[in-house]
Amino acid sequence: MLIKKPTDIRSSEITDKKLYFNSREFIQAATGTAAAAAAGVLGSEALLHAATPAPHGRKLDNVKKSPLSADERTNKWEEITTYNNYYEFGTDKDEPSMLARNFKPEPWTVTVEGECNNKAAWHLEDILKGQTLEERIYRHRCVEAWSMIIPWVGFPLADFIKKCDPTSKAKFVEFTTLYDPKQMPGVRSPVLRWPYVEGLRMDEAMHPLTILTVGLYGEVLPNQDGAPLRLAVPWKYGFKHIKSIVKIKFVEKQPLNTWQLQASNEYGFYANVNPTVDHPRWSQATERRIGEFLRRKTLMFNGYGDQVASLYAGMDLKRNY
Ligand code: MTE
């Protein structure tokens, strides 16, 4: 993103960037000194081990297959859990796999605020009570021009929004990630303005493809992928997929999302995958599917145009990027 452009990302990055030692600059930024980190500020475990795939977690019960799944070969658990953007745990792709190991996603509360009739603090168990979980195999396209196919487990955000009972003033939904400097070393450095915030227009939020995600490959979500609750909006660039959500607020005005705040000339609010609108510093016409050698053509709306193009009828997508 702002930090790395696609040409900076070596195709061998997943396998050869093994040693945490490579991340020493980040540790220094996060803690003041590498010595402080070694003394246990980040946990000595993270310093001694290489990036490793997430441990397997609790199996989720009664997960249904979804007809909305993409019929494509899914990326491996190892790829999905060692190649992450989660700046609260470091700006390198392998850092979240090491620095999120001790993150505690339980117990978890999501506060619902703003223009709705049911403002409340929800325990995650209560959000999930009686909720059917589905496996949704989604194309996941990062603005940095890499992609994966990911078998998320989740449920329509619309199901939860209905429980919150938004008022007629609710035009957008704003999401906020946990901000916890004790658990998240990345937020101790001002690389982004914290906490991470994202937003959707109400019709985007209510769209059946938009899901709140609680699992991966049939198991609870690994920490580095945004445990215990993250968003998946498959026709949008990955930065809309906010992780570890603690607040959902219904608002009248379009929220200012973190990456737009960071660099409004590079990242917009809509962030629809669009091969015809280049990022100012690189092309969006093609992408590198993690695990593949040849680049692929990027598809308009990430291949979900039939389902979502009508949401943007009449809008200038070159201006509303
Ligand atoms: N959410 C938070 N809280 N912090 C982040 O840094 N990165 C975003 C998004 N959600 C990010 C975040 C970006 S840029 C991408 S591409 C996706 O998470 C990556 O999700 P993944 O690691 O599950 O592939």
Image (spheres, rainbow, N blue to C red):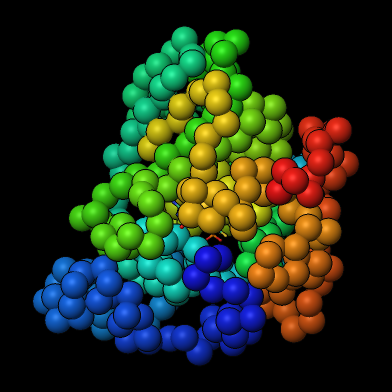
Residue 38, how many percent across, how many down?
A: 16, 79
Along the viewing direction, whichever of 16 and 299 lies nearer the viewer:
299
Q: Residue furthest bottom?
A: 16
Taking 95 as reference, is 238 above or below it? Answer: above
Taking 112 as reference, is 260 above or below it? Answer: below
Q: Is residue 32 left or right of residue 236?
A: left
Q: Quadrant of the N terminus?
A: bottom right
Along the viewing direction, whichever of 292 and 235 lies nearer the viewer:
235
Any part of residue 156 in sight? no
Q: Identify the residue at horizontal 75%, vertical 63% (top origin).
A: 278
Any part of residue 110 in sight? yes
Taking 306 as reference, is 188 above or below it? Answer: below
Taking 57 as reference, is 1 above or below it? Answer: below
Residue 12, how many percent across, how many down?
A: 59, 87
Residue 116, how many percent across, how many down?
A: 49, 14
User: Quadrant of residue 139 in the image?
Assistant: bottom right
Q: Is residue 315 left or right of residue 110?
A: right
Q: Residue furthest front?
A: 265
Along the viewing direction, whichever of 283 and 26 lies nearer the viewer:
283
